[in-house]
């Protein structure tokens, strides 16, 4: 799978063209079509030392207040050849996951990002919540909103909880 995270317009079309020209049309493209400019990326950016050195990413990540843009961006990426659509981050954008699910008939992914993970872990560590239950409730909410797949830092813990 190819998953271009930069979400620049035309990126999916270019990748699809190159894959198809090289007899790789069976390789799916997961589009980060609805990637919001979010403070929830903080822990990952700190760990990877990838926070912007100046300014921010508002020039190419979506405005958190704009739901209609998500539908437009998703539609454009589908027209360009995306096989899977992603919403990032997941929890603060469950309404977007739901709206996209109602609009498209492609696999829909939601990315439960580092800030969502860190909040649950920190609150669990402080004894304020039951971390396992809140983890499962959060992941269930993402699924209930319409995600076919969830990318999450909780993957191993959730798998262990589901198999228990």
Image: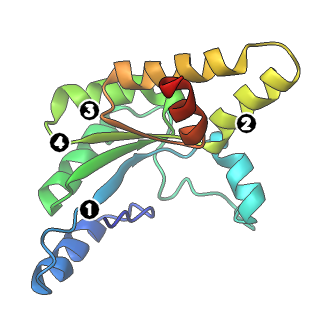
Distance from disc 1 to disc 2, alpha carbons, whole Å, reads: 28 Å
Does the CB distance between marks 4 and 3 fall below 8 Å? Answer: no
Q: Is residue 105 left or right of residue 117?
A: left
**Earlier sequence position, callout 2 versus callout 4:** 4
Type of colouring: rainbow
Element assignment for label 4: loop
Residue at left offset 30%, top offset 70%: 11
Residue at left offset 28%, top offset 39%: 108
Distance from disc 3 to disc 1, alpha carbons, whole Å, reads: 17 Å
> Residue 100, which numbered label?
3
**Earlier sequence position, callout 3 versus callout 2:** 3
> Residue 106, which numbered label?
4
Q: Is residue 20 left or right of residue 130?
A: left
> Residue 118, which numbered label?
2
Of labels 3 and 1, the one closer to you: 1
Q: Nearer the viewer, residue 21 or 125?
A: 125
Residue corresponding to mark 1: 29
**Earlier sequence position, callout 3 versus callout 1:** 1
Distance from disc 1 to disc 4, alpha carbons, whole Å, reads: 12 Å
């Amino acid at each position: 799978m190819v998953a271009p995270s930069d979400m620049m317009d035309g990126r999916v079309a270019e990748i699809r063209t190159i894959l198809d020209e090289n007899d790789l049309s069976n390789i799916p493209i997961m589009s980060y079509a609805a990637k919001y400019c979010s403070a929830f990326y903080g822990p990952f950016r700190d760990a990877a030392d990838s926070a912007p050195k100046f300014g921010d990413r508002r020039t190419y990540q979506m405005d958190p207040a704009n739901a209609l843009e998500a539908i437009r961006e998703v539609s454009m990426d589908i027209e360009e050849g995306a096989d899977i659509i992603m919403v990032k981050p997941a929890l603060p954008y469950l309404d977007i996951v739901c709206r996209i699910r109602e609009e498209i008939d492609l696999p829909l992914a939601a990315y439960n990002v580092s800030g969502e993970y860190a909040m649950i872990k920190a609150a669990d560590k402080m004894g304020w919540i039951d971390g396992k239950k809140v983890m499962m409730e959060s992941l269930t909410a993402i699924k209930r909103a319409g995600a076919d797949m969830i990318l999450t830092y909780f993957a191993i813990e959730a798998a262990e909880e589901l198999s228990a």
